[in-house]
Image (tube, grey):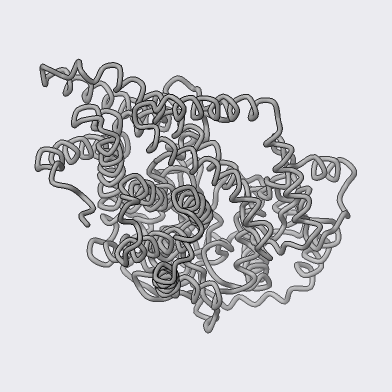
């Protein structure tokens, strides 16, 4: 059975390829136009959101080193849990092309997104022109929302998760999910029970399970609903068909083994920092009650009931493509059921809000498909008689997408603080590259410089983010305290660095998050060791923080006291000759550092990044790069 039929011709591939290049290339054109740094800096600074953090997985898989401590004194750590299939192809590309692999991955994924939805719309009988435009519009809508600042509206903000260039989610993970949707759309249920179908389904399940398990549960539930909708119980329990289920399960388990290996061999402390929470009955009840309260809210009920009525009427009147649109409705139902199913069967959970975000995503996709389907049915007979109109609409949509990219770079370039910060990091990296040594010792509290060091062969980084290495908690603490002692910072500075802060709707300290992440998650669902030893104001905020928002962070008083005592009792021995120190001057505590100017020069510092270079590199220190 062919996945792609003969109607997909050379023109389809080339037009989609041309559009993909236009969407891809201007981001990097604007990056080189506005900023004169190199590619190793660009892939970090111009990666959407916090996507650059996940390059550590890319480096780990491409080098087959899954427990690097980036500390010459620490080895034999457990592994980091890699989302295997989300990283596999990019890591191969990284081995071949180095930093250019990020660009290649972006181009490939843009092409795949457009091509998969083109195939989906072709299966909806939209024709070539409408299928191309509908696919392109889907990728452009988030840009339109950003251009007009509609992303300030909660539901609209989540629409950005349809597809964007954040690595690896949704850049890669969503591609696997959309492949599953396409496969459901193209299935011929008259010939469903055959070995090929069930092997492919096993592969698709494994891809999502090993990349972004939230999609896996939606896929599993939707598949179960569809087969019970299409077939009677006798057919489903037929002996021959049971063998096919076993084939699919075996395929799934076999392909999931790498991911399962990483889960079982990973450092428990690292998983805690990734917000992995143990689920007891009490926490399950808290989550389920909260999810139900959101689903029975007036806003959601109005939207969902309206969609359900539309879907019912489409089925009753056998509206154009109603059977295929049913699949999108089933996916929506599955996204609502998935968090409950997961919470009931799992003894641990990660970021549950991903489930609720996916409900919003599939709500939008259903509405989009329904509206586009209505539009095409109405205007299909009035096809593009003049091909230039088709290309005119392509130019308009691509221009809107790139206008949003231009706007984001213009804002960056007009922000003097950002420009100075970026230049300071670039100066630091330029110096490191000129040393041409993998023995360099780097001290920095900047996450981007940490990731750059990992990606560019720096072997010793101190301190280092708890998300980037599978060190135990006490090792992260030791690194942090050592760095403070090296910089001659006091315990008061240490307290200030980790103190709990109110940020909008939650308690949040970026420093605590950088080094400890989910360990100190503080919400209605969890606090550190279930402590309630916070100030009255902090406790009020925690008790009002949604159990889905586990990224609210606060350290209880007894734990902060333990860290302070550890700091005060720490026996400092200068066992590392630091070659470069890069500090962000915006962090108030770094204004009181004391570093001997006999050993360090500061020629490469900017208004934001203070750079200290060991004078053993005196010639390079004074060199202007």
Residue 490 vertical position relative to residue 363 in the rendered view, above or below: below
Q: Quadrant of residue 336?
A: top right
Taking the spot 54% from the left edge, 52% from the top edge, the residue there is 583
Camera-nearest residue between 610 and 527:
527
Q: Quadrant of residue 505?
A: top right
Residue 96 x %, y %: 23, 65
Where the N terminus falls, by quadrant?
Answer: bottom left
Taking the spot 39% from the left edge, 70% from the top edge, the residue there is 240
Q: Quadrant of residue 134?
A: top left
Count of numbered labels shown in the rendering:
0
Taking the spot 72% from the left edge, 57% from the top edge, the residue there is 520
In the shown orientation, is residue 208 left or right of residue 340?
left
Residue 547 vertical position relative to residue 260 in the rendered view, above or below: above
Camera-nearest residue between 614 and 416:
416
Taking the spot 60% from the left edge, 60% from the top edge, the residue there is 274
Residue 466 x %, y %: 59, 63
Camera-nearest residue between 192 and 495:
192
Residue 216 x %, y %: 49, 56
In the shown orientation, is residue 479 left or right of residue 556?
left
Residue 208 x %, y %: 44, 58
């Amino acid at each position: 059975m062919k996945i792609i039929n003969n109607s997909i011709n050379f023109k389809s591939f080339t037009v989609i390829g041309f559009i993909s290049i236009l969407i891809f290339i201007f981001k990097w054109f604007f990056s080189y136009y506005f900023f004169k740094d190199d590619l190793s800096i660009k892939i970090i600074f111009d990666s959407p959101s916090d996507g650059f953090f996940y390059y550590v997985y890319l480096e780990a898989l491409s080098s087959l080193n899954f427990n690097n401590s980036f500390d010459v004194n620490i080895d034999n750590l457990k592994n980091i849990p890699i989302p295997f299939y989300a990283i596999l192809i990019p890591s191969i590309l990284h081995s071949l092309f180095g930093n250019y692999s990020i660009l290649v991955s972006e181009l490939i994924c843009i092409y795949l997104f457009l091509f998969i939805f083109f195939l989906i719309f072709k299966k909806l009988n939209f024709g070539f022109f409408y299928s191309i435009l509908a696919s392109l519009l889907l990728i452009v809508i988030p840009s339109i929302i950003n251009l007009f600042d509609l992303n300030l509206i909660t539901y609209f903000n989540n629409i950005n998760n349809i597809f964007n260039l954040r690595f690896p989610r949704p850049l890669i993970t969503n591609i696997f999910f959309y492949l599953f949707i396409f496969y459901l759309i193209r299935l011929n249920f008259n010939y469903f029970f055959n070995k090929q179908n069930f092997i492919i389904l096993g592969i698709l399940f494994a891809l999502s399970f090993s990349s972004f398990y939230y999609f896996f549960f939606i896929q599993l539930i939707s598949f179960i609903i569809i087969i019970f909708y299409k077939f009677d119980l006798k057919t489903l329990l037929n002996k021959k068909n049971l063998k096919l289920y076993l084939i699919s399960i075996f395929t799934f388990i076999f392909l999931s083994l790498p991911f399962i290996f990483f889960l079982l061999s990973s450092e428990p402390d690292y998983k805690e920092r990734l917000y992995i929470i143990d689920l007891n009955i009490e926490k399950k009840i808290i989550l389920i009650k909260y999810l139900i309260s959101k689903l029975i809210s007036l806003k959601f009920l109005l939207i969902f009931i309206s969609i359900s009525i539309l879907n019912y009427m489409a089925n009753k009147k056998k509206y154009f493509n109603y059977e295929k649109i049913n699949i999108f409705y089933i996916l929506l139902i599955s996204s609502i059921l998935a968090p409950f199913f997961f919470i009931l069967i799992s003894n641990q959970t990660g970021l549950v809000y991903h489930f609720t975000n996916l409900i919003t995503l599939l709500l939008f996709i259903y509405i989009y498909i329904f509206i586009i389907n209505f539009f095409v049915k109405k205007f299909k007979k009035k096809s593009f008689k003049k091909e230039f109109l088709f290309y005119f609409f392509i130019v308009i949509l691509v221009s809107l997408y790139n206008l949003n990219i231009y706007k984001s770079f213009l804002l960056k370039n007009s922000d003097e603080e950002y420009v100075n910060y970026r230049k300071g990091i670039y100066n630091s990296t330029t110096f490191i590259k000129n040393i041409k040594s993998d023995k360099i010792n780097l001290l920095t509290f900047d996450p981007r410089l940490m990731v750059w060091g990992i990606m560019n062969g720096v072997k010793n980084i101190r301190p280092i983010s708890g998300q980037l290495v599978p060190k135990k908690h006490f090792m992260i603490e030791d690194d942090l305290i050592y760095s403070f002692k090296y910089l001659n910072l006091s315990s008061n500075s240490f307290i200030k660095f980790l103190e709990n802060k109110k940020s909008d709707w939650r308690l949040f300290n970026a420093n605590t998050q950088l080094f400890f992440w989910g360990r100190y998650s503080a919400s209605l669902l969890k606090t550190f060791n279930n402590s309630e030893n916070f100030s009255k104001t902090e406790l009020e905020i925690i008790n009002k923080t949604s159990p889905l928002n586990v990224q609210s962070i606060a350290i209880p008083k007894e734990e902060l006291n333990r860290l302070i005592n550890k700091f005060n009792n720490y026996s400092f021995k200068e066992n590392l000759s630091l070659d470069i120190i890069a500090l962000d001057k915006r962090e108030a505590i770094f204004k009181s550092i004391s570093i001997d100017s006999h050993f360090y020069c500061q020629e490469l510092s900017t208004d934001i990044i203070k750079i200290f270079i060991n004078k053993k590199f005196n010639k390079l220190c004074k060199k202007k790069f």
